[in-house]
Amino acid sequence: MSIVTTDSPLRDTDSPPRISVATVFVNGGALIGYTALSLGVLVAVFLLSSDPLSSARTIVAVFMSLHAAGGLTLVIWLSRRRGIPIRALGVRRPGWKLLHALWEFPLILIVATMAQILFSVLILGQSEPPDNGASRDIAGVGPLVFMVGLLGTAALTPLWEELFFRGVLQGAASQRWGSLIGSIVTAITFAVSHSYLILLPYYLVLGLGLSLLRVFHRDLWGSLAVHMGLNGLVSMVALMA
């Protein structure tokens, strides 16, 4: 018995609503503005803190979860305001195809890591690939604060990023230029948006892999599962380091 339902008004075989370029720019612009405002608040909190160095990791862990929760809410609200139902972004009842994530996760992890290692060794001359420090910031804190940070990095952040990048952006780009170009455009935008140019090879491979999963699964669950798994793995490694 399949766990995929077909009694919804928007079936998998139906043509999804067109996602306009304006919707992409509205969502993207709002996320950029929201992130800039959030970073401003974060800086203000550090400046007003009596002992910012000792509480830095706690502040960052809480900030990551609050920022991710706000980003998720913003993407869903703006998309609905633009007449795009969440199902049109790829949030449908998952099917058995999701089990492919069991081999997709290690494959993308290996390829992305190898791309970064080759870049680090051959181009940068480093023996070890760099890290972005985001997950490391939630290591070394108490269990409760770590769980709050983990919620942000491994759950809420992948949720809003998948909804925007693989849902809104890739949906609009694929409708306009086809699945292949849409996946490439989304992967490049995803990599550049993370602002860690030294980790660009890793994020390019990761972004392309997640975009291809969006095409293969025809929903967000495959890319979301892999994205959550990778972020969670990095956070756990940072904790044990």
Image: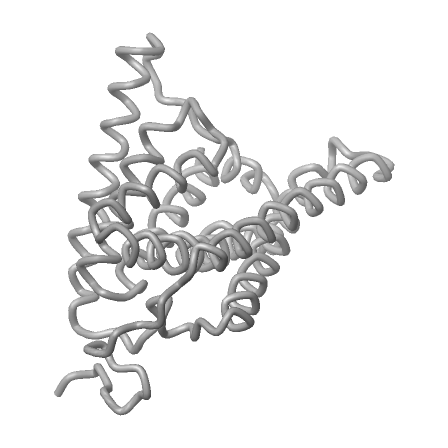
Dividing the picture into quadrants, the one containing residue 141 is top right
Query: Could you say where residue 63 lies in the image, as x and y percent from the top left?
Result: 65, 48
Rendered image quadrant of residue 93: bottom left
| Residue situated in front as seen by the camera: 117 or 143 | 117
Tell me the quarter of the image containing the N terminus: bottom left
In the foreground, 33 or 82:
82
Residue at the spot 34% in from the left edge and 46% down from the top edge: 230
From the top left corner, tell me how far across and down residue 37 is, in percent.
71, 46
**Quarter of the image containing the C terminus?**
top left
Residue drawn at x 80%, y 40% as measured from the top left? 44
Quarter-wise, where is residue 65 in the image? bottom right
Residue 95, horizontal then vertical, whole percent: 20, 74
Taking the spot 70% from the left edge, 37% from the top edge, the residue there is 56
Vertical position of residue 121 compared to residue 132: above or below: above
Q: How does the figure colour the protein chain or chains?
A: one colour
Q: Is residue 119 above or below residue 10?
A: above
Q: Nearer the viewer, residue 119 or 75?
A: 75
